[in-house]
Amino acid sequence: MTGGDSTHATGFLRALVVEDDELVRQTIVEILQRMGCQVSAVRDAQEAVLTFLAGQFDLITLDHRMPGLTGMELHRVLSQEFGAGKRTTGFAASRLCDVVLVTGYGDDPEVVRGRFGEGIVGVVQKPFIEEGLGRIVRGIVEKGGGPGVPLPEETGGRPS
């Protein structure tokens, strides 16, 4: 991981991290916090749904392979309940917030198809480097996601 270019403020995106591995979960939390995100973290799909219902989020990172519901299965549940034009008791969403899949199985066809699902804005491969997640988060802010403000231009000429 690097620190330099990925520490830009994000305008306080509210992020939900869903990851069953404690070390990976903490790493993602630390990366997002360094970027200025307000982060909630949970270890499974059941906790994720409860936390999602209790808060407002601009970004969710989902572990692809978790016990119980996988990240893609959780994404489908959230999309069906809270996706474009969906309405549930006391809650209406114009769209599901942006979702990033975190996976050690980047070539898995389900993950590849998931890149094009509603709200999936990226797939980050484990073990990942901070720039990949940082690039995705900056893209969310730049397109107007969350209460964020435009970020400074990235320097260093790194390839995309």
Image (tube, rainbow, N blue to C red):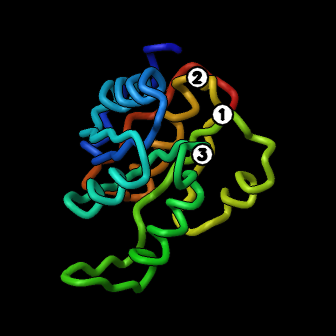
Which labelled disc corresponds to residue 129?
Answer: 2
- Residue at the spot x=73%, y=38% of the render? 105
- Residue at 37% of width from left, 55% of height from top? 46
> Residue at point 46% right, 36% down?
20
Give the alpha-carbon distance from disc 2 to disc 3, as whole Å.
17 Å
The residue most toward the front is 68
Q: Who comes first in sequence, dot 1 or dot 3? A: 3
Which amino acid does the dot numbered 3 rest on? His
Residues packed near mark 1 inside 10 Å, few (<14), some (14 to 19) or many (20 plus): some
The residue at which mark 3 appears reads as: 64
Q: Looking at the rendered structure, which numbered label has been put on residue 125?
A: 1
Name the kind of residue labelled 2 in the image: Ile
* SS category of the residue bearing label 3: loop
| The one of 19 and 107 positioned closer to us in this rendering | 19
Earlier in the chain: of badge 2 and badge 3, it is 3
Q: Tell me which amino acid carries mark 1.
A: Gln
Above or below for 69 versus 133:
below
- Residue 160 in the image, given as x and y percentages of width and height: 67, 34
